[in-house]
Image (spheres, rainbow, N blue to C red):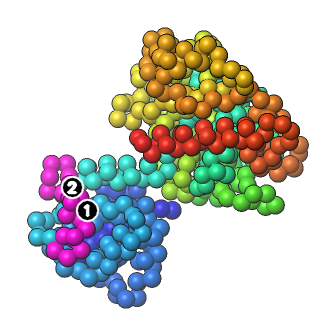
């Protein structure tokens, strides 16, 4: 679990607790040295807590400016290249480390209008950037969403590293079946070790809870503790295969029950559960990727609300363009502007030999008007070619999941080029995320 580390002075207890509580309510865990603790005894755990945090909040006050412990903690954070967010809680004059390192960055103060809310927004932004969430989505079916979720992000993990989590949000659960045979997938779902446990209280959270998958006409709005990542995910790497972290939360048909539900209060509670659980999972990963269904449903909204960016695969043809256009409309009409993910478009199944007129026109902006947005600007430079390597068959029973990844396994001509395309798509997506 990753947290925000709070640096404070011995007399800052009231402000410390206010900041802690405001962040807790926003779903962000904090760590701070308990006021009055014997600092020599707790030095080792403090150092570890700094190293594991995603950001350091410094309460800037007369008390913290004079504190040696506070100075040492800030210096450790700076030495590790951490994000430091100073937060003024009184008007004390800066000196020492505070003056040298923090003076230029003093934008936020408790005394300002909405000061605490601004701090929470800043910390939340940092938290989200630490682990972006992507939806692979197009409202047209069969354009390569599942293939891209598996292969581009499998290549991301292999080439760019980091801990990557794939989540199968499509009730067809093809992404899960890319890695596991149907029986293994269904066995996991039978224990609720599957995507439904991100939405409703299930046997994964409490052994005596009924399974939401067996109750088609019932929605449970009960809150539940967010599951530990290791209890719900399936590792796709490791064992005798390549190392690194690429995990999957497997899918199931039963989440299509939400499309038939009419109880809007319960649906809203279930959406909130999902957002909270995804936010929590951000602390264990560096990237989360949803594979999604091809029509606009409750699941589409949940995915978009949780996402920082949408990757829309598209064939170079008018039908796919229409799917992307509808997707952009859904984004604009149903997602609040301050929470709206950015859209990137990735051509898939292009001819290997020559660029089609459609693709060239799209890159020149000739389809922007038809798309209803700046399609040329949203297009990634990389285009994935039509290739037998990307037409992955279902695995044999007991086949190691990593063998379904083209970046690690495959045979025959053209493999090197395909791997280069997958890696280059991943790098471009990362660049866009970093530039945002
Ligand atoms: N670049 C490619 N070259 C060859 N075959 C491909 C390529 N991309 C996808 N395919 C194949 O096209 C089919 C559809 O792809 P995929 O299942 O990824 O689409 P999808 O958008 O997820 O579909 P759905 O809307 O049903 O979820 C699959 O058989 C897949 O193996
Ligand atoms: Mg699919």
> Where does the image place residue 104, in percent across and percent down from the top left?
21, 60
Q: Residue at x 44, y 21 (%)?
A: 374
Visible residue check, residue 195 = no
In the rendered image, residue 55 lying in the magenta stretch gets the answer: no
Label 2: which secondary element: strand
> Where does the image place residue 253, in percent across and percent down from the top left?
71, 33
Q: Residue at x 52, y 21 (%)?
A: 363
The image quadrant of residue 123 is bottom left
Query: What range of the chain is rendered magenta?
Result: 95-115
* 3D distance between C-alphas at marks 1 and 2: 7 Å
Which residue is at the front of the view, 430 or 182? 430
Q: Earlier in the sequence, mark 1 or mark 2?
A: 1
Q: Check the image and report above or below for 12 versus 327.
A: below
Residues at discs 1 and 2 in contact (Cβ within 8 Å): yes
Q: Residue furthest front?
A: 354
The image quadrant of residue 60 is bottom left
Label 1: which secondary element: strand
Q: Check the image and report above or below for 58 versus 394.
A: below
Visible residue check, residue 336 = yes
The mark total stands at 2
Label 1 crowd (10 A; few <14 / some 14-19 / many >=20): many
| 329 left or right, relative to 218 | left
Label 2 crowd (10 A; few <14 / some 14-19 / many >=20): some
Q: Check the image and report above or below for 298 versus 321.
A: below
Q: Residue at x 70, y 28 (%)?
A: 385
Q: Which mark is residue 86?
A: 1
Q: Which residue is mark 2?
A: 108
Q: Check the image and report above or below for 58 versus 206.
A: below
């Amino acid at each position: 679990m990753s947290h925000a580390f709070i640096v404070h002075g011995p007399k800052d207890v009231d402000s410390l607790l206010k900041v802690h509580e405001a962040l807790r309510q926003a779903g962000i865990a904090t760590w701070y040295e308990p006021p009055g603790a014997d600092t020599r005894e707790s030095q080792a755990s403090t150092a570890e807590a700094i190293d594991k945090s995603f950001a350091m909040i410094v309460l800037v006050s007369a008390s913290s400016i004079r504190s040696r412990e506070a100075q040492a903690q800030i210096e450790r954070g700076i030495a590790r290249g951490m994000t430091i967010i100073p937060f003024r809680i009184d008007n004390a004059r800066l000196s020492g480390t505070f003056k040298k390192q923090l003076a230029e960055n003093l934008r936020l103060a408790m005394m300002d209008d909405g000061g605490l809310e601004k701090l929470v927004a800043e910390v939340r932004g940092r938290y989200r950037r630490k682990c972006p969430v992507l939806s692979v989505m197009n409202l047209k079916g069969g354009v390569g969403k599942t293939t891209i979720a598996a292969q581009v992000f499998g290549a991301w993990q292999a080439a760019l590293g980091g801990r990557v989590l794939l989540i199968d949000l499509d009730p067809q659960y093809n992404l899960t079946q890319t890695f596991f045979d149907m029986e293994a997938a269904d066995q996991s779902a039978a224990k609720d070790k599957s995507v439904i446990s991100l939405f409703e209280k299930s046997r994964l959270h409490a052994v005596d809870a009924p399974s939401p998958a067996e109750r088609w006409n019932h929605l449970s709005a009960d809150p539940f503790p967010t599951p530990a990542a290791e209890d719900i995910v399936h590792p796709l790497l490791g064992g005798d295969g390549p190392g690194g972290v690429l995990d999957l939360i497997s899918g199931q048909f039963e989440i299509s029950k939400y499309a038939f539900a009419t109880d809007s209060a319960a649906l809203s509670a279930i959406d909130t559960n999902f957002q909270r659980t995804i936010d929590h999972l951000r602390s264990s990963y560096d990237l989360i990727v949803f594979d999604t269904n091809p029509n606009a449903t409750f699941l589409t909204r949940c995915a978009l609300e949780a996402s920082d960016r949408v990757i829309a695969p598209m064939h170079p043809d008018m039908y796919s363009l229409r799917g992307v256009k509808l997707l952009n409309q859904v984004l604009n009409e149903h997602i609040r502007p301050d929470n709206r993910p950015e859209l990137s478009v990735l051509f898939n199944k292009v001819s290997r030999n020559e660029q089609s007129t459609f693709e060239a026109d799209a890159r020149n902006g000739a389809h922007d008007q038809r798309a209803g947005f700046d399609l040329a600007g949203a297009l990634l430079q990389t285009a994935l070619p039509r290739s037998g390597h990307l037409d992955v068959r279902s695995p044999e029973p007991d086949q190691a999941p990593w063998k379904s990844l083209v970046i690690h396994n495959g045979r025959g001509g053209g493999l090197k080029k395909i791997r280069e395309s997958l890696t280059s798509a991943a790098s471009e997506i990362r660049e866009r995320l970093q530039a945002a």
